[in-house]
Image (tube, coloured by chain):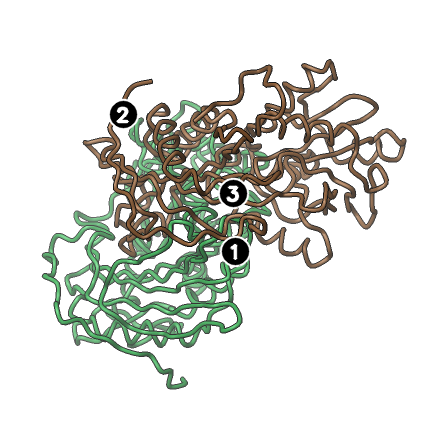
Chain colours: A green, B brown
């Protein structure tokens, strides 16, 4: 790796840390952050680590009006030997650049970004919680900063990385979630931005989420925008089904986010000689498998929860209860294996883990 | 109208104004802005007019990550008698609240917003250019400000209004634009956020726009996300066609923005006893009408251009040249009538104009 020059300006006022045994997701942030600027004609410049601080922008900055922005999410884990582990971080930087391409944001130097990320984590390593299941959530993001109200690509951007210590996702053991199948709202459609990690996809999802919550469902199952039939994602996670011994996940079709956890689950399953198929799968097929008693498990995959077992789908006034609403053995095994690799307590046959 | 209490804090440093005969769109901003805050449990509070100033936000503020934001665009005109006119501003405030509902942002008091807007314009009235075709562009917008990385609705927001003097859209007379029919990218789909005025729709449009520009086309014609067949919008405008004497515009279907100019054009045409139909219309129907010599005119409608005549469509390697690439008589008449009503030089039979 090249020796990138990153200016470092350490804080003189360290913050009081939150209690690490009762952390909430995404509420607390560490002492420092990484920033790099982009100026047309000059490219990305002035990479620097500075005290965590507010962003000051002109009210006409394009991020506030036209949503030209991308982000990533990954985690760092502290091992019992006080080593810091990252899980496939190069995949997040690659995806960040794929998202950049879709959103007309200039490409970043992935190696520099990864180098900066490691530097930042090393500086704020006291903020990595060590209790089981806890981790340091990492949020790289890029925003359009030019003060201009024309609908066009911005001529200036900021790339930032902020860090947030997060608690265990499952505080009282894995709890399967109840999911409402969404029939009115659509998250994304082929040709849109669904396969980019960009703000608008999440903004579009809030309304359905809010309505599902009112009826006691914690997330929605998104169907495709064209035929309202084929399964896309669950909440902000990818989804897998185990039907009659075979694992099926929706094929990447342009509107589904290419999850790093999704890809890791596919590789793990193949490593275990379990058949896993990426293909179109309709809600009708799920319903039929359920009726025939063949729907064995369903689970979401994502950075926050890693594996999120699904206990029930609600579709057209019918409750499809999966595995008696309990966590299935495959979901559990995947969770244990992935988190074990991530936190260094299990071997890493794929070379996924990167030491800081 | 109620007497709303808006705190006013005038600037002590007035900016140098740009040259009003060479204004660009959305590049210059006036001396003041309006701000109002929303806090969960407290509602919207502290409406105030302050010197135009940067916004300072935590890097975790949700606007930077999940795009929960809405905006509006309208214009103020200065008449020869130095009166300030707004065009149907209550329609923009209504639409702002419709967009808010879709994006899970709390409703604003439309009357208060309109009152604040008028106060702000009165304070910055020196910034309204008076040359023919110039105006003061008004940008109300709301952003999610809570510093939280969970995917959920924000618990705090800021509503702002900024003002920008803008030059004549057509500096050398109306120039018809050349439009590429977009077959790969999609702006929005039914069930998505296409009928809300929100950042993500514009972010999604940049890539297609960029690729069209490379081949010499200034905008794209958006087809529907389901079948890639039915016409939706052109660039960030609504679209109308005149075919064999009849005017047709795509019906509002959930993915098309309900433009104030679109609605005004429909009302004007009916007032003139010209048949205007809102219905689904496919690109194939346009192609057929063109081949039969029945496609007389096409034009976009929006706040910025008011009427934007279309001189050519590029579709499947074929150029469809409309009215010899020149502005058609109906486009011209609509432009003259609408801008005449807006700037007070023509009668206002619909009561559209509001005096500040």
Query: To which quarter of the image does residue B167 belong?
Result: top right
> Which residue is depicted at the point 83% across and 46% down?
B319
Q: Which residue is mark 2?
A: B4
Residue B94, image x, y percentages: 44, 25
Q: Which residue is mark 1?
A: A103
Q: Which quadrant does the N terminus of chain B fall into?
A: top left
Residue A209, image x, y percentages: 36, 35
Q: Which residue is mark 3?
A: B201
Chain ID at mark 2: B
Foreground residue among B349 and B68: B349
Circles 3 and 2: CB distance less than 8 Å? no
Judged from this view, the residue extending furthest toward the front is B81
> Which residue is depicted at the point 79% across and 47% down?
B316
Helix, strand or loop at mark 3 = helix
Query: To which quarter of the image does residue B340 belong?
Result: top right
Residue B213, image x, y percentages: 67, 55
Residue B64, image x, y percentages: 36, 52
Near mark 1 (Cα within 10 A), the count class, few <14, some 14-19 or many ≥20, is many
Q: Is residue B225 at all visible to an observer of this figure?
A: no
Helix, strand or loop at mark 2 = loop
C-alpha gap between disc 3 and disc 2 = 33 Å
Helix, strand or loop at mark 1 = loop
Instruction: Tell us which disc is closer to us: 3 or 2.
Output: 2
Does residue A194 lie above or below B97 as drawn?
A: below
Near mark 2 (Cα within 10 A), the count class, few <14, some 14-19 or many ≥20, is few
Foreground residue among A322 and B69: B69
Does residue A245 lie above or below B49 as drawn?
A: below
């Amino acid at each position: 790796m090249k020796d990138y020059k990153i200016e470092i300006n350490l804080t003189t006022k360290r913050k009081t840390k939150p209690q690490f045994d009762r952390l909430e997701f995404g509420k607390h942030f560490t002492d420092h952050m990484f920033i790099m600027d982009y100026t047309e004609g000059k490219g990305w410049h002035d990479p620097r680590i500075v005290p965590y601080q507010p962003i000051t922008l002109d009210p006409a900055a394009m991020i506030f009006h036209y949503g030209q922005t991308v982000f990533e999410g990954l985690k760092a884990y502290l091992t019992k030997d006080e080593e810091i582990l990252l899980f496939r971080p190069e995949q997040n930087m690659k995806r960040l650049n794929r998202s950049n391409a879709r959103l007309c944001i200039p490409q970043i130097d992935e190696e520099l970004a990864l180098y900066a990320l490691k530097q930042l984590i090393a500086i704020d390593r006291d903020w990595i919680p060590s209790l089981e299941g806890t981790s340091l959530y990492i949020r790289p993001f890029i925003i359009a900063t030019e003060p201009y109200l024309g609908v066009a690509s911005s001529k200036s951007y900021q790339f930032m990385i902020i860090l947030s210590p997060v608690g265990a996702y499952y505080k009282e053991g894995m709890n399967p979630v109840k999911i409402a199948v969404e029939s009115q709202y659509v998250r994304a459609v082929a040709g849109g931005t669904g396969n980019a990690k960009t703000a608008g996809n999440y903004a579009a999802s809030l309304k359905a989420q809010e309505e599902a919550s009112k009826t006691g469902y914690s997330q929605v199952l998104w169907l495709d925008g064209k035929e309202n039939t084929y399964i896309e994602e669950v909440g902000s996670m990818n989804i897998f089904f185990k039907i009659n011994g075979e694992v099926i996940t929706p094929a990447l079709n342009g509107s589904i986010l290419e999850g790093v956890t999704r890809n890791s689950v596919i590789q793990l399953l193949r490593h275990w000689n379990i058949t896993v198929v990426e293909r179109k799968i309709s809600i009708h097929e799920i319903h039929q498998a359920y009726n025939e008693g063949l729907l064995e498990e369903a689970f979401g995959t994502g950075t926050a929860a890693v594996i999120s077992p699904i206990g029930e789908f609600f579709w057209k006034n019918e409750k499809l209860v999966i595995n008696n609403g309990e966590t299935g053995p495959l979901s559990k095994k995947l969770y244990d294996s992935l988190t074990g690799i991530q936190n260094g307590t299990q071997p890493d046959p794929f070379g996924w883990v990167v030491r800081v």
